Amino acid sequence: MNGDVALTLIDEVPVIGARYLEKERALAEAKKLVARVSARVHDDNHTAVRVNFVSQDDGRYTLQVFSGDEPVAEVANLDELMLRRFRKAYNARKMFILTCFVEGMDDGPHSLVITDGLGVVIYKPFGALLS
Protein backbone atom coordinates (compact mmCIF):
# COMPACT_ATOMS: atom_id res chain seq x y z
CA MET A 1 0.00 0.00 0.00
CA ASN A 2 1.23 3.46 -0.74
CA GLY A 3 -0.77 5.14 2.05
CA ASP A 4 -3.32 6.62 -0.30
CA VAL A 5 -7.03 6.13 -0.54
CA ALA A 6 -9.27 6.30 -3.58
CA LEU A 7 -12.89 7.32 -3.98
CA THR A 8 -15.06 6.91 -7.04
CA LEU A 9 -18.77 6.82 -7.78
CA ILE A 10 -20.50 3.93 -9.52
CA ASP A 11 -24.09 4.85 -10.40
CA GLU A 12 -23.78 7.60 -7.78
CA VAL A 13 -22.82 5.07 -5.06
CA PRO A 14 -19.51 5.93 -3.39
CA VAL A 15 -16.80 3.28 -3.66
CA ILE A 16 -13.87 3.81 -1.29
CA GLY A 17 -10.75 1.97 -0.26
CA ALA A 18 -7.00 1.80 0.00
CA ARG A 19 -4.84 2.13 -3.12
CA TYR A 20 -2.16 -0.42 -3.93
CA LEU A 21 0.58 -0.49 -6.54
CA GLU A 22 0.41 -4.26 -7.13
CA LYS A 23 -2.82 -6.00 -8.13
CA GLU A 24 -1.89 -9.17 -6.20
CA ARG A 25 -1.59 -7.22 -2.95
CA ALA A 26 -4.85 -5.35 -3.59
CA LEU A 27 -6.64 -8.64 -4.31
CA ALA A 28 -5.26 -10.23 -1.14
CA GLU A 29 -6.34 -7.27 1.00
CA ALA A 30 -9.81 -7.13 -0.60
CA LYS A 31 -10.28 -10.86 0.02
CA LYS A 32 -9.29 -10.38 3.68
CA LEU A 33 -11.81 -7.55 3.96
CA VAL A 34 -14.61 -9.65 2.47
CA ALA A 35 -13.68 -12.56 4.79
CA ARG A 36 -13.71 -10.31 7.91
CA VAL A 37 -17.12 -8.98 7.01
CA SER A 38 -18.47 -12.43 6.09
CA ALA A 39 -17.39 -13.76 9.47
CA ARG A 40 -19.61 -11.18 11.18
CA VAL A 41 -22.66 -11.42 8.93
CA HIS A 42 -25.68 -13.13 10.45
CA ASP A 43 -27.68 -15.89 8.78
CA ASP A 44 -29.95 -13.38 7.05
CA ASN A 45 -26.92 -11.80 5.29
CA HIS A 46 -27.32 -8.59 7.26
CA THR A 47 -25.52 -7.30 10.29
CA ALA A 48 -25.50 -3.96 12.08
CA VAL A 49 -22.41 -1.87 11.55
CA ARG A 50 -21.34 1.52 12.80
CA VAL A 51 -19.41 3.90 10.56
CA ASN A 52 -17.53 6.90 11.87
CA PHE A 53 -14.64 9.19 11.02
CA VAL A 54 -11.68 10.01 13.23
CA SER A 55 -9.41 13.01 12.73
CA GLN A 56 -5.76 12.19 12.16
CA ASP A 57 -2.94 14.36 13.48
CA ASP A 58 -2.11 15.50 9.93
CA GLY A 59 -5.58 16.97 9.32
CA ARG A 60 -6.88 14.02 7.32
CA TYR A 61 -9.47 11.48 8.42
CA THR A 62 -9.81 7.75 8.96
CA LEU A 63 -13.04 5.96 8.06
CA GLN A 64 -13.78 3.18 10.56
CA VAL A 65 -16.37 0.41 10.26
CA PHE A 66 -17.35 -1.54 13.38
CA SER A 67 -19.60 -4.52 13.96
CA GLY A 68 -20.56 -4.12 17.60
CA ASP A 69 -17.28 -3.23 19.30
CA GLU A 70 -15.19 -5.20 16.82
CA PRO A 71 -13.35 -3.25 14.09
CA VAL A 72 -14.23 -4.59 10.64
CA ALA A 73 -12.34 -2.21 8.39
CA GLU A 74 -10.41 1.03 8.39
CA VAL A 75 -9.48 3.37 5.54
CA ALA A 76 -6.99 6.08 6.48
CA ASN A 77 -5.85 9.32 4.87
CA LEU A 78 -9.07 10.82 3.53
CA ASP A 79 -8.62 14.53 2.98
CA GLU A 80 -11.45 16.93 3.77
CA LEU A 81 -12.62 17.24 0.16
CA MET A 82 -12.78 13.46 -0.23
CA LEU A 83 -14.64 13.19 3.08
CA ARG A 84 -17.23 15.75 1.93
CA ARG A 85 -17.69 14.02 -1.45
CA PHE A 86 -18.07 10.67 0.29
CA ARG A 87 -20.64 11.96 2.81
CA LYS A 88 -22.66 13.76 0.15
CA ALA A 89 -22.84 10.67 -2.07
CA TYR A 90 -23.48 8.36 0.89
CA ASN A 91 -26.27 10.53 2.27
CA ALA A 92 -27.91 10.63 -1.17
CA ARG A 93 -27.79 6.85 -1.71
CA LYS A 94 -27.65 5.59 1.91
CA MET A 95 -24.99 3.08 0.92
CA PHE A 96 -21.35 2.72 -0.03
CA ILE A 97 -18.96 0.02 -1.19
CA LEU A 98 -15.73 -0.74 0.61
CA THR A 99 -13.01 -2.30 -1.55
CA CYS A 100 -9.41 -1.84 -2.68
CA PHE A 101 -7.98 -0.05 -5.70
CA VAL A 102 -5.02 -0.75 -7.96
CA GLU A 103 -2.99 2.01 -9.55
CA GLY A 104 -3.58 2.18 -13.29
CA MET A 105 -0.99 3.06 -15.87
CA ASP A 106 -2.52 6.23 -17.30
CA ASP A 107 -6.08 6.50 -16.12
CA GLY A 108 -5.82 6.47 -12.33
CA PRO A 109 -6.76 3.80 -9.80
CA HIS A 110 -9.03 0.89 -10.76
CA SER A 111 -11.63 -0.39 -8.30
CA LEU A 112 -11.61 -4.13 -7.62
CA VAL A 113 -15.41 -3.93 -7.52
CA ILE A 114 -15.39 -3.33 -11.26
CA THR A 115 -12.40 -5.40 -12.30
CA ASP A 116 -12.85 -8.42 -10.01
CA GLY A 117 -16.22 -8.09 -8.27
CA LEU A 118 -14.57 -7.75 -4.83
CA GLY A 119 -16.05 -5.43 -2.27
CA VAL A 120 -18.47 -5.06 0.60
CA VAL A 121 -21.74 -3.15 0.31
CA ILE A 122 -22.65 -1.22 3.44
CA TYR A 123 -26.01 0.47 3.60
CA LYS A 124 -28.01 2.38 6.15
CA PRO A 125 -31.74 1.60 6.21
CA PHE A 126 -34.40 4.14 7.12
CA GLY A 127 -32.54 7.09 5.62
CA ALA A 128 -30.29 7.81 8.59
CA LEU A 129 -27.38 10.19 8.07
CA LEU A 130 -23.75 9.20 8.42
CA SER A 131 -22.14 10.72 11.48
Image (cartoon, rainbow, N blue to C red):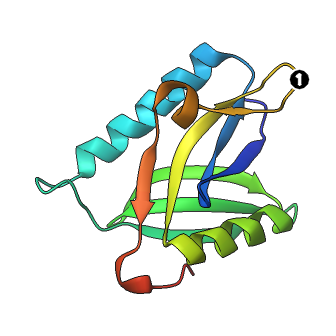
Q: Residue at x 64, y 69 (%)?
A: 89
Residue 124 occupies quadrant: bottom left
Q: Dot 1: within a 10 Å radius of its alpha carbon, few (fewer than 14), some, or many (20 or more) residues?
A: few
Q: In this view, does 46 lie above or below 21?
A: below
Residue farthest along the front direction in this orientation: 11
**x then y, percent, for residue 103:** 77, 26
Task: Using the rendered view, name the quadrant where residue 20 is placed.
Answer: top right
Q: Foreground residue, 103 or 117?
A: 117
Residue 28 rendering spot, x and y as whole percentages: 50, 22
Q: Is residue 53 found left or right of 49 in the rendered image?
A: right
Q: Left of 32 or right of it: where is 113?
A: right
> Disc count in the image?
1
Looking at the rendered image, the quarter that the N terminus falls into is: top right
Residue placed at 41% from the left, 66% from the top? 123
| Whole-percent x, y for residue 31 in the image | 43, 28
Q: List x then y, in percent, for residue 112.
A: 56, 31
In this view, the residue in front, 93 or 69, is 93
Could you tell me the amino acid type at mark 1?
Asp
Residue that numbered label 1 is attached to: 106
Which residue is painted at 57% across and 81% down in the image? Answer: 131
- Secondary structure at numbered mark 1: loop
